[in-house]
Image (cartoon, rainbow, N blue to C red):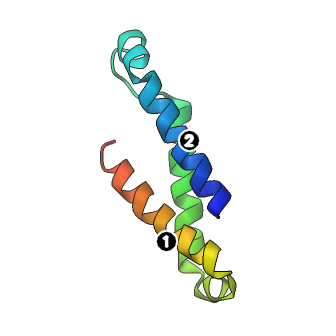
Amino acid sequence: MSCMLNSFEELQKAFMKAAPVIAKEENGQTLRFYMRCLIEMEDFVNEMWEDRKGRKNMSKNNSKSLSSMRQKLRKYLKDF
């Protein structure tokens, strides 16, 4: 989970860095593959969150990463 959190943060930074180019080339429209990636990530996080038994069996680090990933993803998706 912590690896996924790091990947999400890197993806977010890369998208923000590329935002001016995307705004110019795509007329400000968010790329389909990026949205698809975010939606798949949200589905995975929600599925993991609903599995209470699996969450309890996670290590403390993974459980904490899942919570933080869920919060960051929900906050980030509000903009789209």
Is label 1 in a helix, a strand or a loop?
A: helix
Task: Residue at 54% x, 78% y: name it.
Answer: 50
Q: How many marks?
A: 2
Tell me the amino acid under the disc marked 1.
Ser
Residue 1 position (above or below residue 37): below
Q: Residue 57 is drawn in which quadrant?
A: bottom right
Query: Do the CB atoms of the residues marked 2 and 1 lie less than 8 Å apart?
Result: no
Measuring 48% from the left and 27% from the top, which residue is drawn there?
A: 31
Asked if residue 35 can be seen in this view, the reply is: no
Amino acid under label 2? Answer: Glu
Position of 80 compared to 21: left or right?
left
Answer few, some or many: residues within 10 Å of disc 1's Cα (few below 14, many 20 plus, some between 14 and 19). some
Taking the image as shown, residue 43 lies to the left or right of residue 57, namely: left
* Image coords of residue 56 (percent x, y): 62, 88
Identify the residue under disc 2. Answer: 10
Residue at 52%, 68% in the rendered image: 46
Q: Secondary structure at mark 2?
A: helix
Instruction: Quote the CA–CA distance across marks 2 and 1.
Output: 18 Å
Indicate left or right for 4 with 22 as reference.
right
The N terminus appears in which quarter of the rendering?
Answer: bottom right
Q: Is residue 50 above or below residue 13?
A: below
Specify whether residue 28 is in view.
Answer: yes
Per the image, the residue denoted by label 1 is 67
Q: Is residue 1 above or below residue 80?
A: below
Q: Quadrant of the C terminus?
A: top left
Choose top left, top right, bottom left or bottom right for residue 5: bottom right
* Mark 2 or mark 1, whichever is nearer to me: 2
